[in-house]
Image (tube, rainbow, N blue to C red):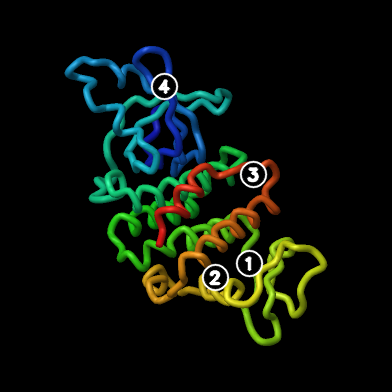
Amino acid sequence: MQIHHTKGIVLRTVKYGDTSVITTVYTELFGVQSYIVKGVRQSSKKSQGKAGYFQPAAILDLQVYHNELKNLQFIKEFQWAVLYKNVLTDVIRNAVALYIVELLQHSIKQPEANPELFYITEEALLQIDDCSAATLANMPLYYSLQLAAELGFRMQGQYSAQTPFFDLQEGCFVPQAPQHPQYLQDEQAAFTSQIVNAGNITALGHLLLNRNTRRALLHSFKNYFALHIADFGDLRSLTILQEVLS
């Protein structure tokens, strides 16, 4: 079987047997894949600490076996692709990173590759590791809308006096309140427009949302995904994220 070299972002890891793990990884080459990693939970000196590579949000360099006919693949070799300074140890930065990887996992239903989405997610995690507190607070909102755009349901239009409502079902700014409750208005609609049209991550630090507005938008953006992705489910990381972000 051919060996492939790919980068991967760890989404989720569970124990398997006495000494191994099964890890779900978003790979640059193959999209979402599940791998058995044998022996990384052994107490031997050779294996000590290796399970730590498979923490959610870790970015790894991988050598993998790939068989399109199988749902469970194998990893031959692994090492850090990125050595974070803060993401795996800082409570707030880790909460943001866990939100990103869980949102990604819930949003992708098929395993096919999407290198552009991989790079968007990788860049978001790198920024989380080192950005200012003001930028960090808005990163979950920014990444959510980047992900929506990449998956084909980008928010259309912008907030104005003529289009002061955002229709979450239709995905666009509209002149009148829709005939259903799934819409944003006033400050929430205005900030959503600014996030959609933010030219780069640096601009996020200048968007001064208060805690209540940010929490409300996170909830609304989760609903936006649920309206556009079948069987989206709940985000366990969202509750923690809403608590730690100021």
Which label lies toward us, 3 or 1?
3
> Which residue is disc 4 drawn over?
15
Is mark 4 in CB contact (under 8 Å) with mark 2? no
Dot placed on the residue nearer the N-terminal end, 3 or 2: 2
Find residue 243 and report its horizontal and vertical position in percent: 44, 53
Nearest to the eye among marks 4 and 1: give it: 4
Residue that numbered label 3 is attached to: 232
Q: Mark 3 or mark 1, which has the lower sequence index?
A: 1
Mark 1 near mark 2, Cβ–Cβ under 8 Å? yes
Viewer-nearest residue: 241 or 153:
241
**Looking at the image, is mark 4 or mark 2 earlier in the sequence?**
4
Amino acid type at circle 2 is Val
Which residue is labeled 1 in the image? 155
Q: CA distance from mark 4 to mark 1?
A: 39 Å
| Tag 4: amino acid | Lys
Q: Amino acid at mark 1?
A: Met
- Would you call the spot at circle 3 few (<14 residues within 10 Å), some (14-19), or many (20 or more)? some
The residue that label 2 is drawn on is 196
Q: Position of residue 225 (x, y in %)?
A: 63, 53
